[in-house]
Image (cartoon, helix red, strand yellow):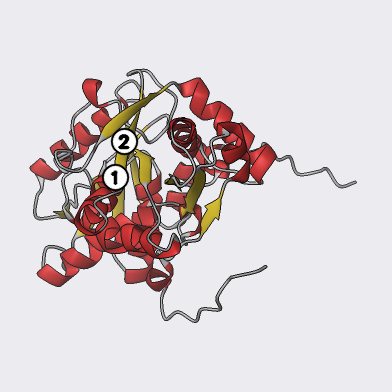
Amino acid sequence: MNTAIDVAAPSVLELVGNTPLIRLRSVEARAGTGAEVWAKCEFANPGGSVKDRAARQMILDAMADGRLTAGKTLIDSTSGNTGVAYSMIGAALGVPVTLVMPANVSAPRKNITRAYGTEVIYSSELEGSDGAIRMVREIVAKDPDRWFFPDQYGNASNPRAHYRGTGPEIARQTGGRITHFVTGIGTTGTLMGTGRYFKDHHPQVRVVAMQPDDALHGLEGLKHLPSSIVPAIWRPDGIVDDTIWMPTDEGWEMSEDLVRHEGLFVGHSSGGNVAAALRLARGAGPGAVIVTILCDRGDRYFAPLAWNRPTVY
């Protein structure tokens, strides 16, 4: 049954959030415990990822309190998805955007941000997201009046977006039956905001973080905190009940399984999230309702095809 709702929106900003929740029957079957496994389809946001929520909240809050004014350019570091979200929202609001990205982020993410008119500065691929963070701080320090630096890793509006949106939506969509929430951490905003909402309003929910198990991992967009700059918004005490350490191969294999068995073409961070949900489901039983996040689509990771114009004789 098609449960889509016709929406007439005055702006693309109004299309962020209220994403679908989908049941993952093949994952439940693999667990074999009677636990329910659900995933929030954040790729359904207009910018294609969960980062639309945080970017919108950070920009709107800054415009409301005067930190972002006419004549300033938004600048931040990103591994890709937040940059796409900044670029989309900046275009809609007339805010110029400059991004600092590691040089090895996927080609589609680079191309999408540039399509919106965003200026991209590349940091060393050898330093990952931490190198981009250091570079953007140096740029802002040299000319602070030119820039609005939202700092997604340290901005309270990032988790606030999920406290106000993601958490209440999941609670409503599960009829309040959710027992576990698990997601990977990058900026940590999704876990911090959604987790805080559940602890405040549904304290029975067990909140679980997923991290890559190694500093040199292949789960793009996620952080291995023991080897990384720890985001200022990462305040797990009283929110995070447990951590699952995820090998890259396990996350990648789950991404492939989701395509083949659920028809969901999602990225590797989403694969890691669902793999973590499967682990939880295997340790739970009937009555458990486990929810995770599908962060973005798999096409964000494709390299572009080389097209040749046919010769016409």
Which residue corresponds to mark 2?
209
Which residue of the protein is positioned furthest toward the right in this rendering?
313
Question: Which amino acid type is shown beneath numbered disc 2?
Answer: Ala
What residue do we see at 9% from left, 42% from top? 141
User: Which numbered tag is attached to residue 191?
Assistant: 1
Give the image quarter of residue 128: top left
Label 2: how many Cα within 10 Å (few below 14, some 14–19, many 20+): many
| Callout 2 secondary element | strand
**Res. 286 visible in picture:** yes
Give the image quarter of residue 266: top right
| Callout 1 secondary element | helix
**Res. 71 visible in picture:** no
Image quadrant in which the N terminus is located: bottom right
What residue do we see at 40% from left, 64% from top? 17
Q: Position of residue 72 (x, y in %)?
A: 18, 61
Q: How many marks on residues?
A: 2
Mark 1–mark 2 Cα distance, whole angstroms, equals 7 Å
Question: Which amino acid type is shown beneath numbered disc 1?
Answer: Leu
Relative to the observer, which residue lies in front, 48 or 34? 34
Q: Are marks 1 and 2 in contact (CB under 8 Å)?
A: yes
